[in-house]
Amino acid sequence: MASVPEKKENNVVTLSVDVTPEAFADALQRSFKKNANQFMIPGFRKGKAPMGLVTKYYGEGVLYEDAIDFAANPAYAEAIKEHGLEPVAQPEIEITEIGREKGLKFSVSVTVKPEVALGEYLGVEAVKPEFPVEDKDVDDELKRIQERNSRMIPVEDRAIQDGDTANIDYEGSIDSVPFDGGKGASYDLKIGSKTFIPGFEEQLIGHNSGESLEIKVTFPESYGSEELAGKEAIFAVTINDVKTAELPELDDEFAKDVSEFETLEEYKESLRKKQEENAANRANGIYEENVIKAVADNAVIDLPHVMIDQEIERMVDEQRNQMRYQGLELEQYLSYMGQTLDTFTEQLHEPAENRVKTRLVLETIAKAENVTASDEEIEEEIEKMAKMYNMTVEDIKSRLPDMKDSFVTETIIQRKTVERLVAQAKPVAPPPEPEQQDEEGNVLSDAAEPVVEAASGDTPEDSAKE
């Protein structure tokens, strides 16, 4: 067998492969043995006619389909190995010559893993943010814990206030006609939670338990139900009862009740340490991402389109599985969000491209730095997986027959590669945020951060709620 490679654009390689007449004759013989029972020759029982008579009667071409498989597949595999190619997609084969006397000649076009031209990767500079923990952060967390440990007590001697929880019956109508999903009974609504339509909760303030009233609201233009969006509605509301949260005192007894600490100060210090640990983990995670991005940005790769398309398919499958875990089909979720699968897929092109490039860069660095996974590391990783998935080590191993080439090994090598890059990287402080200015060019020293509102996720069943 002989093969000649020719490299084309976007990492497509065309191989011209020759299979000798002797090798192809053997493939024809194997094809005949496989298909002998399909041939009927007068004077012979089915499957008993000799090969020469069969090819004379039916023509040699009747054996070509399987013979090509028998001859071309090993020849292709040998050519790939000979030239050190790593295919990333199924090959396209074109037969150029075939016959017992001629042998088999074919060309095969296949997309191969691209070469990676590494740039600087050890000692790169990357932004490492800081997330200092302030006294207010600790106090806010303590307040949240205090609220979680509150108890609800009835309100009987005053009207509803912001922060109270009103138990209500309600029924909404538009032009005196009730609409689907606009009715509820014994619903606990916390005033100020903004779970209902804008303006609804505020109109309950000042009213008392036992009262009935009408609340007028206008559904937002962006409301999830087109039938209700922008419409004015009236809700008939009855206030069944009102409760308010009674907060426990923040003292040593509180600390003993909610933690293993004896004093409030000790408990607050533990909250601070936990927040500092979380802040450090967050900063380190972002720093690691920035290091990897800097290294990937320094590399040059001609990414094959097929690898990006394959990654997009994987990302769609990941999203589909995540949606199913939540009881939804991806198409159903996208329709609900006003998207189609095509528009969603288009948005994945850039992140998919970044994923593929990053993976290839880390693989190349691992080879350049001779990063490997030891048997002990593989065993430790499998034990972690077994605990995570509540399986035995033997079960995990039975699903990974070749441990040295398994994704477990790849995971370890990639992790060690990233650790090496991060260890040698140089952290730099984030650049100062640009000054914000008003329309007249004046600097806004206390400018509010922009707020991006999530798309409305309302359903007809939640028509009273925002």
Image (spheres, rainbow, N blue to C red):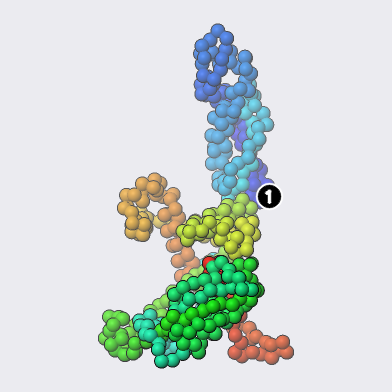
User: Could you tell me residue 331's position as x and y percent?
Assistant: 57, 56
* Residue at point 50%, 89% (across, down): 206
Q: Is residue 71 above or below residue 238?
A: above
Compare residues 86 and 461 and report the one nearer the observer: 461
Quadrant hosting residue 409: bottom left
| Quarter of the image where one finds residue 117 | bottom right
Q: Quadrant of the C terminus?
A: bottom right
Q: Is residue 309 above or below residue 456?
A: above
Please give the name of the residue rendered at 64% of the width and 67% of the height, measured from the top-left corner: 226
Q: The N terminus appears in which quarter of the rendering?
A: top right
Residue 288 on image: x %, y %: 49, 70
Q: Position of residue 88 (x, y in %)?
A: 57, 48
Quadrant in the rendering for residue 39:
top right
For disc 1, the marked residue is: 9
Residue farthest toward the right in the current orientation of the protein: 440
Q: Amino acid at mark 1?
A: Glu
Residue displayed at 60% across by 60% down: 335
Task: Tell me the element at label 1.
Answer: helix
Instruction: Count residues near mark 1 (Cα–Cα under 10 Å), then give few for <14, some for 14-19, many for 20+.
Output: few
